[in-house]
Image: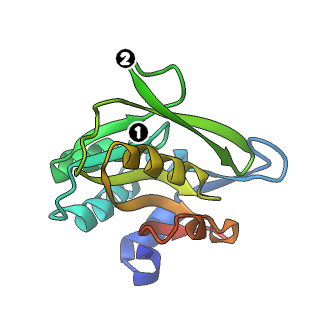
Amino acid sequence: MSAYRDEDPRINGIKTKISVVPNFPKPGIMFQDITTLLLDSKAFKDTIDLFVERYKGKDISVVAGVEARGFIFGPPIALAIGAKFVPLRKPGKLPGEVVSIKYDLEYGSDCLEMQIGAVKAGERALVVDDLIATGGTLCAAMDLLGRAGAEIVECACVIECPDLKGRERLNNKPLYVLVEYH
């Protein structure tokens, strides 16, 4: 589901603030840069507000943000809906015992880690990132949370690149996006 399809008037303002950087981080990639969105306080607030409106009252106890841009959107959403924020980080960034998972990206591979004990069995979780491309990162995040016994309520992204078919890789887990880039 996409707010864009629902034609919320705030969506166009958000969409116009996302810039596209060709051939970054490597040739052939059309990088969706949210920096320009973050520089516009109204568009940034509208982005957070749309997510909060969707998730308030859904009994979500965990908002898991994927490093690094999920750290930008996740904490304000968590605070507004009364949930804790759990960072899903790159290797070697979290103290204590962690659980990790390796996964493939559109342009390489990566690994995510989560502190053991950050999420308890039965907690309802929302996964937040800036973008879904091939779906590898979101699948890895859901797997980490699932290993802890969390129930994944939904994944939330600002941007979706539907041509890369990441949504299909999510195995029917709900995905909510604000804008699509073709």
Task: Look at 32% across and 37% down and name the residue there.
Answer: 86
Kind of residue at badge 1: Phe
User: Of discs 2 and 1, which sits in the foreground?
Assistant: 2
Kind of residue at badge 2: Gly
Mark 1 residue element: helix
The quadrant of the image that shows the C terminus is bottom right
Which one is earlier in the sequence, the residue at label 2 or at label 1?
1
Tell me if 169 is positioned left or right of 74 in this view. right
In which image quadrant can residue 51 be found?
bottom left
Q: Residues within 10 Å of mark 2 (few under 14, many from 20)?
A: few
Name the spot of residue 152 as percent of width and height, x first: 34, 58
| Residue 51: image tag | none
Q: Residues within 10 Å of mark 1 (few under 14, many from 20)?
A: many
Tell me if 129 is positioned left or right of 41 in this view. right
Q: Disc 2 marks which residue?
A: 96
The quadrant of the image that shows the N terminus is bottom left
Query: Which coloring applies here?
Result: rainbow
Tell me if 44 is positioned left or right of 37 in this view. left
User: Is 69 located above or below residue 12 in the figure?
Assistant: above
Residue at the farthest top position: 95
Mark 2 residue element: loop
Residue at the farthest right position: 27
| Residue 71: image tag | 1
In which image quadrant can residue 50 be found?
bottom left
- 135 vs 123, nearest the viewer: 123
Name the spot of residue 103 as percent of width and height, x first: 63, 44
Name the spot of residue 82 as percent of width and height, x first: 15, 48
Could you tell me if the residues under marks 2 and 1 are in contact, i.e. CB atoms within 8 Å? no
Name the spot of residue 78 as percent of width and height, x first: 25, 47
- How many numbered marks, from 0 up? 2
Task: Look at 52% across and 54% down and name the residue there.
Answer: 139
- 8 vs 138, nearest the viewer: 138
